[in-house]
Image: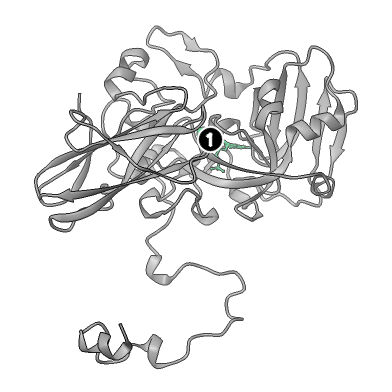
């Protein structure tokens, strides 16, 4: 349509708006760009009552407002145990020692001179969804599944680093330790480290943000976020796990019997509808698109099913390319809302054949007092007003 035709059709306002009537700022006012002011509501949020302090806390990614599979760096959720460390890369070192032939202390410059890899992978806190074990509690996709982000990570593969140092016979585990005040440390199987682990210095094209571990963090595709040590300063190779305080007190999955699951590193298949959602209500009957995300720490998403009647009937949702292993995957399903109430659900099936469970099925195994690894099906109740509510159905 031409401008004049659009104006006749009522498409252009009679009074020229400011942005058309005059010139905008030039190219020097904003050396590092920021989103439009009209997008000011798209921010990370925390839940005040969840943690005693904001230093040992979490903020959540606004999944409801994002598109595609990559999370903008400024909106990537943050989970810190002693606040966000502000590390000077010139002073920072990565020490690799223990059962290696040639221990090293690497500068950031040393790392940058090694051949890099780029890997797209999701990061998910093991506590994602953890507030929902006893019942639906938080009304929003941001809070129900927002301890989640996905980025293209660039850095040096741990395999390259360990080829450099050599690994002694009998080595089986690697301890990774952070330089923040929490000095978070976790034991990681050597096989995983040699498979696809990365010491990353960049995220989505730019250097890591301080909140994501600047200048370097460990990337462990498919594994729980806690093991992705930020502000990484040390890798120690050994023959057994260390059972650090993070492994024995926190980040342990307790069963109703009182026993603990010994190792539960992988984030199993999960999915959520990002719209319609509590933050994205419906505005009158008619055509909509059900938008969602699916992911699995065990590989690629093979299929996503969507239900509008609380899991009685399912239809397969088309997956949007790219469908990458251990990365967020998009699905879009056109849907006509008739104005009646509906129970929206999605469930992910990954390439291992694993099917995302219902909350009831998961509770049978894990009880109601579990904290971590709640990857159960999320249910949104669409009311006849178009409002959407987080509920759980048996
Ligand atoms: N050094 C250090 N690394 C850390 C943490 C921390 O507190 N200190 N938090 C961990 C937890 S629990 C999670 S879920 C992820 C979160 O990564 P993000 O903040 O980049 O989203 O970082 C992990 N790495
Ligand atoms: Mo976490």
Is residue 84 shown to the viewer in this render?
no
The quarter of the picture showing ligand 1: top right
Q: Quick one: 159 or 287, which is closer to the camera?
A: 287
Q: Quick one: 48 or 149, which is closer to the camera?
A: 149
State the residue lying farthest toward the right. Answer: 102
Residue 165 at what x, y percent from top left?
Answer: 86, 29
The quarter holding residue 341 reads top left
Which residue is at a point 76% across and 51% down the rendered structure image? 89
Q: Is residue 305 left or right of residue 330?
A: left
Q: Is residue 81 left or right of residue 319?
A: right
Residue 65 at what x, y percent from top left?
Answer: 37, 55
Label 1 environment density (alpha carbons within 10 Å; few <14, some 14–19, many ≥20) = many
Q: Which residue is mark 1?
A: 325
The quadrant of the picture occupied by the C terminus is: top left
Q: Is residue 216 left or right of residue 71?
A: right
Q: Secondary structure at mark 1?
A: loop
Is residue 36 shown to the viewer in this render?
yes
The quarter holding residue 146 reads top left
Residue 145 at what x, y percent from top left?
Answer: 39, 39
Which residue is at a point 23% across and 53% down the rendered structure image? 288
The quadrant of the picture occupied by the N terminus is: bottom left
Above/below status of 45 relative to 132? below
Q: Is residue 285 left or right of residue 51?
A: left
């Amino acid at each position: 349509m031409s401008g004049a035709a659009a104006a006749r059709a009522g498409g252009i306002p009679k009074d020229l708006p400011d942005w058309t009537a005059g010139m905008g700022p030039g190219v020097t006012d904003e050396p590092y760009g920021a989103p439009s002011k009209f997008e000011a509501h798209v921010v990370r949020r925390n839940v005040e009552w969840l943690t005693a302090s904001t230093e040992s806390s979490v903020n959540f990614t606004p999944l409801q407002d994002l598109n595609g599979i990559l999370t903008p760096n400024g909106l990537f959720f943050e989970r810190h145990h002693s606040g966000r460390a502000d590390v000077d890369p010139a002073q920072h070192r990565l020490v690799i020692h223990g059962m290696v032939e040639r221990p090293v202390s690497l500068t950031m410059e040393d790392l940058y001179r090694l051949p890099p890899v780029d890997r797209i992978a999701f990061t998910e806190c093991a506590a994602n969804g953890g507030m929902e074990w006893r019942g639906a509690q938080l009304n929003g996709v941001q809070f129900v599944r927002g301890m989640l982000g996905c980025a293209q990570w660039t850095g040096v593969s741990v395999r390259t680093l360990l080829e450099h140092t050599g690994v002694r016979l009998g080595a089986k585990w690697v301890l990774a330790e952070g330089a923040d005040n929490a000095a978070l440390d976790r034991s990681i199987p050597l096989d995983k480290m040699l498979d696809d682990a990365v010491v990353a210095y960049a995220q989505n094209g730019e250097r890591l943000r301080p909140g994501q571990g600047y200048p370097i963090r460990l990337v462990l595709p498919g594994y729980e976020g806690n093991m992705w040590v930020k502000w990484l300063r040390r890798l120690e190779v050994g023959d057994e796990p260390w059972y650090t305080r993070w492994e024995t007190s926190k980040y342990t999955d307790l069963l109703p019997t009182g026993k603990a699951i010994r190792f539960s590193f992988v984030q199993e298949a999960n999915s959520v509808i990002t719209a319609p959602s509590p933050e994205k209500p419906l505005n009158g009957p008619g055509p909509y698109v059900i938008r969602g995300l699916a992911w699995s720490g065990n590989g690629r998403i093979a299929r996503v099913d969507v239900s509008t009647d609380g899991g009685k009937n399912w239809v397969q949702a088309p997956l949007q390319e790219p469908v990458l292993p251990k990365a967020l995957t998009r699905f879009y399903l056109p849907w006509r809302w008739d104005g009646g109430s509906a129970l929206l659900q999605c469930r992910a099936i990954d390439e291992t054949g694993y099917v995302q469970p219902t909350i009831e099925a998961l509770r049978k195994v894990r009880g109601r007092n579990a904290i971590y690894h709640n990857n159960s099906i999320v249910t949104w109740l669409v009311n006849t007003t178009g409002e959407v509510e987080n509920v759980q159905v048996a």
